């Protein structure tokens, strides 16, 4: 791919040039322009909704076999091309190459999973309370679904929304994030060859204010599945509720990892370093608050610092890189500002946090660890979304649990302990959608529900069999013979 390549939209079954384009720049090497991608207009977004609306009744009537064949074909091609797509992902988003390939692999598995789900349509037939009457309960597609995704998982998140939408018979209008449109374009390219009838899937790249806003407010879009920041999520929900459209939001996190005195120290250090810093800390499930009991605190901090000193920060595509760049200039600026905020709040910057100059010009930052922090500091209450974590020292389990739950967010919550009693109690009392025991707060399976509580999520769960709740509507029929 040369720097002059231009990538448009996929509307009504064919690719068309976008009305305007913006360059997609590699955050590991700012001289590398990946290509120019659509910065599309309101008219193009409206055209995508019109195409999806026209195609919706036909796809709603497709058979389970047709849906299986198409989703399976998409999954097969993603898996066959995972190295190439993973390379693009690492190049445009800054995940390391193995992480990029891993995420692409997961996207392929998600399509395969929902191919299988298409062959398992549910439904119940039960006797009525009235004589000679049957009651039938079925799920039907909701119609046109608007899918709006963030930059940090540019192939997995689109996959875990698009695959169930198609599986349950909906048509789709999809807008990838502005910062990482190439993976969305590749996915559209693969879908364009899958045999899906024209108009059932449409992709328009562009800004949230224009393209996203059309999808959210269009009367022909029956539901919006959104992943992104809390600020935008609130706005999307308000607009959807006002016109009674379905809405599902996955947003930020401030995920705690509790480390108790009885934890296996090595496990706890590995879990903390992986959860806090891998993928450059740019995961909604990243551990940003390490809540550590007094007896293990000093050894834990010493070992974590030793481990992060050894992490290789570098070009996402270079062999041996463990931490790629921050995704953008804006995000790096925000991370650096939080490092200053932490210092001004009285926290000790125990390691890292500074911008790094490496061989290629990029948005590199040394993984940062704060110690001597308290729960109310801004670095412990606001989502940073970068390679910055803080340690909060506590006296025992009850205090650790209280601090872990003392947040407006509730996505993923972890504990490292060898006590079954504490692990089970934490599982019960953690105010989060996902609980991890002796595992990083980030890193989930694709066949089970994903989502959070409190400020992190709104609406029904994504992924696994639970995805049906959002992508279908229930019909109850009473039939008398
Ligand atoms: P963002 O909210 O800025 O953007 C998300 C998407 O919304 C983008 O496609 C954007 O173009 C679009 N958008 C922006 N304004 C819009 C509007 N007015 N109407 C409609 N769409 C609009 O988020 P981001 O910076 O891309 O992603 C980072 C955020 O995503 C973090 O807060 C992170 O925690 C969150 N995230 C959450 C999960 C999860 O599953 N909980 C997963 C990944 C990322």
Image (cartoon, helix red, strand yellow):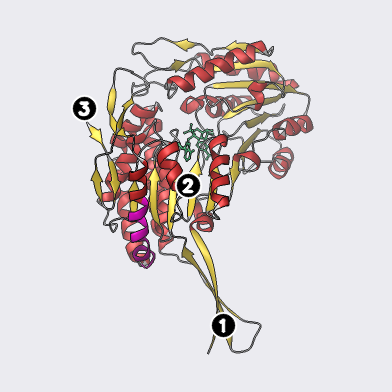
According to the picture, the residue beneath numbered tag 3 turns out to be 4
Which element type, helix, strand or loop, lies under badge 1?
Answer: strand
Q: Position of residue 394 (x, y in %)?
A: 75, 24
Image position of 401 with respect to 462: above or below: above
Q: Residue at x 24, y 51 (%)?
A: 193
Which element type, helix, strand or loop, lies under badge 3?
Answer: loop
Is residue 393 visible in this depiction of the protein? yes
Q: Position of residue 451 (x, y in %)?
A: 57, 44
Pick whichever of labels 3 and 2 is earlier in the sequence: 3
Q: Mark 1 and ligand 1: say if the CB distance to the nearest ligand atom is below 8 Å.
A: no
According to the picture, the residue beneath numbered tag 2 turns out to be 216
Q: How dense is the environment of label 1, judged by Cα within 10 Å: few (below 14), some, or many (20 and up)? A: some
Q: Main secondary structure of the magenta part?
A: helix
Q: Residue at x 61, y 11 (%)?
A: 350
Highlighted range, magenta:
49-61
Which element type, helix, strand or loop, lies under badge 2?
Answer: helix
Q: Mark 2 and ligand 1: say if the CB distance to the nearest ligand atom is below 8 Å.
A: yes
Q: What is the distance, in whole Å, between disc 1 and disc 3 at their CAs?
A: 63 Å
Pick whichever of labels 1 and 3 is earlier in the sequence: 3
């Amino acid at each position: 791919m040369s720097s002059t390549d231009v990538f448009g939209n996929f509307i009504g079954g064919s690719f068309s040039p976008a009305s305007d384009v913006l360059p997609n720049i590699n955050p590991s090497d700012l001289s590398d322009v990946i290509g120019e991608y659509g910065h599309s207009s309101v008219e193009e977004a409206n055209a995508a909704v019109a195409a999806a609306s026209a195609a919706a009744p036909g796809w709603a009537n497709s058979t389970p076999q047709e849906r299986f064949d198409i989703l399976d074909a998409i999954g097969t091609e993603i898996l066959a091309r995972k190295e190439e797509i993973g390379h693009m992902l690492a190049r445009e988003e800054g995940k390391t190459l193995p992480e990029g390939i891993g995420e692409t692999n997961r996207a392929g598995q998600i399509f395969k999973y929902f191919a299988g789900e298409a062959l398992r349509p549910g439904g119940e037939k039960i006797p009525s309370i009235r004589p000679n009457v049957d009651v039938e309960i079925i799920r039907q597609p909701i119609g046109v679904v608007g899918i709006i995704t963030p930059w940090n998982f540019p192939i997995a998140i689109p996959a875990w929304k698009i695959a169930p939408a198609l599986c349950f018979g909906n048509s789709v209008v999809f807008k990838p994030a502005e910062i990482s449109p190439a993976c969305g374009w590749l996915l559209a390219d693969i879908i364009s060859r899958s045999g899906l009838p024209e108009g059932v899937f449409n992709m328009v790249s562009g800004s949230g204010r224009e393209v996203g806003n059309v999808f959210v407010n269009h009367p022909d879009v029956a539901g919006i599945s959104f992943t992104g920041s809390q600020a935008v999520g609130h706005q999307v929900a308000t607009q959807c509720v006002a016109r009674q459209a379905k809405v599902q939001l996955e947003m930020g996190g401030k995920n705690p990892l509790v480390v108790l005195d009885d934890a296996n120290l090595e496990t706890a250090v590995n879990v903390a370093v992986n959860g806090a810093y891998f993928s450059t800390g740019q995961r909604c499930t990243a551990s940003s608050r390490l809540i550590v009991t007094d007896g293990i605190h000093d050894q834990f901090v010493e070992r974590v610092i030793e481990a992060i000193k050894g992490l290789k920060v570098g070009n996402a595509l270079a062999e041996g890189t463990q931490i790629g760049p921050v995704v953008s200039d804006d995000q790096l600026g925000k991370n650096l500002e939080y490092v200053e905020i932490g210092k001004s709040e009285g926290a000790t910057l125990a390691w890292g946090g500074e911008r790094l100059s490496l061989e290629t010009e990029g948005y590199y930052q040394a993984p940062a660890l704060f110690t001597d922090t308290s729960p109310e500091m801004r670095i412990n209450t606001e989502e940073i979304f970068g390679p910055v974590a803080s340690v909060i020292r506590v006296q025992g389990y009850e205090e650790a649990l209280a601090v872990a739950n003392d947040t407006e967010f509730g996505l993923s919550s972890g504990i490292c302990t060898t006590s079954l009693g504490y692990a089970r109690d934490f599982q019960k009392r953690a105010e989060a959608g996902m609980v991890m025991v002796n595992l990083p707060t980030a890193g989930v399976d694709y066949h089970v529900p994903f989502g959070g509580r409190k400020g992190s999520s709104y609406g029904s769960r994504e992924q696994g069999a639970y995805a049906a709740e959002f992508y279908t509507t229930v019909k109850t029929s009473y039939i008398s013979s």
